[in-house]
Image: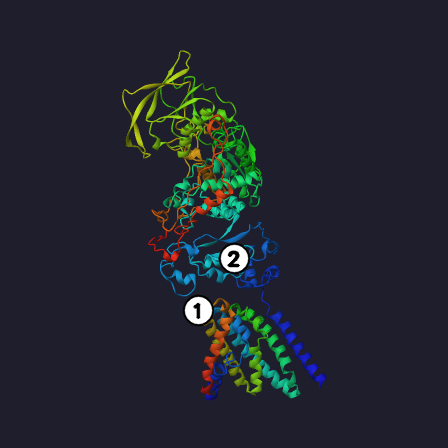
Amino acid sequence: MILNSLLVLMGLGFTAATILAVASKILHVKEDPRIAQVEDVLPGVNCGGCGYAGCNGAANAVVEGKSGANVCVIGGIETAQAVGAVMGLEVLDMELELAFRDCTGGQRAEELFNYEGAGNCRAQALLYGGAKTCPEGCLGLGTCEAVCPFDAIHMGPEGLPVVDPLACRACRKCVEACPRGVLSIVSMSAKLLHLEEVNDCLAPCQQKCPANINIPRYIEAAKNGDYAGAVNIIRERNPLLLVCGRVCPRPCELDCRRTHVDEAVGINMIKRFVADWEMNNNLRLHIPCAKETGRKIAVIGGGPAGLSCANFLRRLGHSPTIIEAMPELGGQLRYGIPEYRLPKKDLAWEIQGILDLGIDVRLNQKLGTNFTINDLEEEGFEAFFMGIGAWASGTMRIDGEKAQGVISGTEFLTGIGLGQPPNIGDNVIVVGGGNTAIDAARTSIRLGCDVTLLYRRTRAEMPANIEEIEGAADEGVKFIFLSAPTKVIMDDKGKATHLECISMELGEPDDSGRRRPVPIEGTEERYPADTIISAIGQKPQLSCFYTEGEEQCNIDFTRWRTIDAHPQTLQTSIPMVFAGGDAVSGPDSVISAVGAGRIAARSIHYLLTIGKIPLADNTLRRLIPYTLFKDVDGCKNKTRTPMPHNCSGDDRISTFKEIEGCLTEEELQHETSRCLRCGLICYDRDIPLENVFTNRVGEKVE
Amino acid sequence: MKEYFLLFISAIFVNNIVLAQYLGNCPFIGTSKKISVAIGMGSAVVFVATMSASITWAVQEYLLDPMGLQYLQTLTFILVIASLVQFVEMFLKKAVPPLYKSLGIFLPLITTNCAVMGIAIICQREEFSFIKTVAFSFACGMGFMLALIVLSAIRERIEVSRTPKSMKGTPIALIMAGLMSLAFFAFKGMI
């Protein structure tokens, strides 16, 4: 009995085994042996995160060449390397990618209608595109949470998905599921390379900022006490936060939605606070850089555009070298902006932080004099960025301009910056209405002079920052408006003694939209002057592009004698040469140059890595109309913190001490609490959303 | 003919293998999240159940019964079904690659599925003839597939409905399965 059963079982087992063994031989399917090998090194959990049917499907895809070695989203770099070893593929060090939620609206976003259908974003999106007034915002029904195979997304208390960075494997399931494009998979490099698009969640301030800094996010980080987080958010767009925190003309604040409630949020004061916090604590927060690519790029000009471009190129993994004509880096930041606005030690600290990323510097090397583009090409540089600024001054086009005692504004400020202040006497007349003119005037005041500023239009038309004009007036600069120089009167030694001026009146508006000044005959007047500083019409010095003896040069210029570069890529007429900053735009703000530096770095990165520069059709080019409100309801008034001042009175006008100060922590709390955390349409209200009736509806911008 | 028709109705509706006999609940809940998966799993079960019931019928008839070793039924059936599934997998891979592609990942899952085993044993208990065994096991497989597809269709809709948080996923699926079972109970009076 026992024997029988044993024999039967053994017999059956043996037969089955034999059949299977024979079958496996006969029915053997010739399969690429690598499929099994690849499958072996995959984790084998069949999670489906890669988008293929289990690990076997993934292995098949790899062998068929449909997928790269990094097919597995959960295995990480070790798995990718193992797969690469089987397939003989080179595995590039993958940068950490994470799902990122763009929308900040959530429950603050107004509803277009009351939706009571299936609890699925895709179902809701079928009905008039979704129930939110914002055309790009999160619908909040959690489809991403449902599709996430790794349990990495959870709907947070604000009605927005919150991504758990430790659990997210960047499998893109949520990206595919979201009908609104709220989620995307981004790496650090992708964030640096992203050009803002009209479908992104962009507050008006972020749209207006020439560098598109994510202002609401950094203010929120600062509000929560995460100063390091705020600094890192700013650094994604602007490496010169100490500088901009001090000298930025703050275009963002003009379009701050809070201007419709009381006054704009002190965005730049908040930036300055976090930037100063990093410097004063000497933290030097770690700045992540992508893996070394070894591509050499020459950045010609060490001003804000060049520093920004080099910074972003380095963070994208390339090896930039900054070549600077002056003895020190900084460009106009060092040689144009006076000490009382931007202390040199702060500038040096900021520049050092950028150079510490691993950027080479060559000083005292002038393009066209000490080297040419061809020399650099021979040295192995593959791409070039021209951030040469606008250092040549325009002439006043009047008699006696060559007289001794007539100098240009840039010349004067550069002399100061180099520590060689020119002898300017007691009576100084500054001609011009831009920031250079104001800087020259305020600097002269500090040198103990009696300063008069001459401008041919009125105060309202002055291109300089309002605070700067007010500052100059406070410090005792005398203004003469509607007056233009006609002649420099010299003594017999050829030294200027007087400036003859003529009164003007405003006529018809010109191309720039400003009313053209027209001279009034017979109103000439003479003002005594020891020094006449002409600060008008700065332009790039283009002579450096012409090689000796040649009339032609390969780079095209605009009719304003600036470098002609494609507005979105900053590529010049020579494909591997890019340009940005004042050299392209003419005299402009630091933040514009910083923005241009990043755009050029992006173009160079793409040109070197994929051979072309991708441009989306929906790139943000101007402010999105439906995001600009005429009124903002439901917000209570909160007074703007006044700009703190470090010095006053004699101390202010006789020394070069920094004038503007930094907020205290309490003031920062107050100022950050004024931010409405705007999105495209949504913003923080002080009244519950149920009591809000809005007829504001955003339109989808294609 | 009438007998076979009744056998079909009985196996699919009245004595549904999942909803009336409560066999194979694990894959019933596990693979009923999506209709496409349910169809794949269902067809695999139909296929394997028919094959295994026929082979085990032969094993019982020509090996166990003559030798009086009925008490080894469970052991031998497991062994036979497991090897059979392996064999079928290899065979499909070679002979019918498209079918292998659609059933491939489900075949190993049902190597020791209790529904498959149950069907084989029921056929023995009812002392069916070979033809009847084939017909009955096929019908039982169809019943499993029907239940699976219906539940997955319900679950796809439940997924997007407002469900209490604690009920999301498996709990609500079990409730739905219970309700379905109750509904199928109505077939009891038919035969």
Q: From the viewer's perspective, is A325 left or right of A585? A: right
Residue occupied by mark 1: B157
Going 55% across and 38% down the picture, which residue do you hit? A279
- Callout 1: few (<14), some (14-19), or many (20+) C-alpha neighbours within 10 Å? few
A449 vs A254, nearest the viewer? A449
Q: Nearer the viewer, mark 2 or mark 1?
A: 1
Q: From the viewer's perspective, is A671 left or right of A64? A: left
Residue B82, image x, y percentages? 61, 75
Question: Disc 1: which chain?
Answer: B
Instruction: Determine the secondary structure under disc 2.
Output: loop
Residue A179, image x, y percentages? 42, 58
Residue B132, image x, y percentages? 52, 85
Up/down of A410 relative to A595, above or below: above
Kindly identify the amino acid type of the residue bearing the numbered disc 2.
Cys
Kindly identify the amino acid type of the residue bearing the numbered disc 1.
Arg
Going 49% across and 33% down the picture, which residue do you hit? A646
Q: Quadrant of residue A533?
A: top left
User: Which label was assigned to residue A171?
Assistant: 2
Up/down of B152 relative to A175, above or below: below
Q: CA distance from mark 2 to mark 1?
A: 25 Å
Residue A305 appears in the picture as rendered: no
Instruction: Determine the secondary structure under disc 1.
Output: helix
